[in-house]
Amino acid sequence: MRSKFGDKDQSYALWGIPSSALSRTILPLGEHSKKEVRKIASENGFRNADRPESQEICFIPDNDYAGTLRRWSKSDSQAFQPGPIYNSAGKKLGEHKGFAHYTVGQRRGLGISSKVPLYVLRIKADDNSVIVGEDEELLARKFRVSSVNLLMETPDVPERITAKIRYKHQDSPATVDFFGDGMTVTFEEPQRAITPGQSAVFYAGDFVIGGGIIDEVIE
């Protein structure tokens, strides 16, 4: 279930734990607020009791995720090769510095002059291009999900659920359809910047139904 401390809820990040492992998982801090946990840690001499919270990716201390990816990648990785930036009509607007530096919904750092704000709409690794457009072009309702992990039997999944497409996203009503080992998710209302590679997590009220990896935005 979601945490009763909503600002610290980690259910979005835990959807991938198999039921067999989750049944043997103990979450001893679930009834305590962060403030209470810090107090207990301080009283017991924990050196990190007052350590500031991480606001970025915790295992990348310099917050340079692209630099970390470059260090972990092959020297000739296409993700760091320059390529074209197109608008949604196929017109070339400029060059990018490697698609690893961009994410769907990004506005800053595009290096393009435009009368209206432009945002990354899609990243196409197959031809090393980045597609940009106006804000309203980021809205979509339907997408496919793979690597699905359900915490209940498929027939028991409610027809109408809510879904989150990123950690800070407010979950929104949606319906799901199963095909093979994947799912198609359709939001009732368009959502901004549905991003392939991100987790989609499904809820029935406060209960986590499961989740998967966003594969493709359909419409």
Image (tube, rainbow, N blue to C red):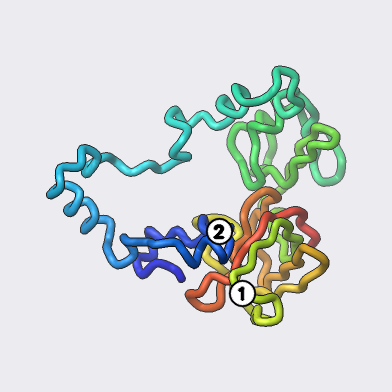
Q: Say which residue appears at 46% left-offset and 63% top-offset.
A: 24
Q: Dot 2 lies on which element?
A: loop
Residue farthest toward the left in the current orientation of the protein: 43
Q: Residue at x 26, y 40 (%)?
A: 51
- How many neighbours does mark 1 have within 10 angstroms: few (below 14), some (14-19), or many (20 or more)? few
- In the displayed structure image, the side of residue 191 where residue 10 appears, left or right: left
Q: Position of residue 8 (x, y in %)?
A: 38, 58
- Three-letter code for the amino acid on which mark 2 is drawn: Ile
Image coords of residue 151 (percent x, y): 59, 70
Residue 73 sits in quarter: top right
The amino acid on which the numbered mark 1 sits, given as a three-letter code, is Met
How far is mark 1 from mark 2, CA to CA?
12 Å
Question: Can you tell which quarter of the image residue 139 is in?
Answer: bottom right
Would you say residue 172 is visible in this rendering? no
Which residue position holds label 1? 152
In the rendering, which numbered label is found on residue 17? Answer: 2
Would you place residue 76 above or below residue 181 in this image?
Answer: above
Q: Circle 1 sits in a helix, a strand or a loop, which is it?
A: loop
Residue 215 seen in this snapshot:
yes
With 105 as the anchor, is 85 left or right in this view?
Answer: right
Residue closest to the eye, 97 or 80? 80
Residue at the (56%, 72%) spot, across then down? 203
**Residue 128, image x and y in percent?**
80, 32
Quarter of the image containing the C terminus? bottom right
Residue at 65% across, 81% down: 156
Decide: is 80 above or below 7: above
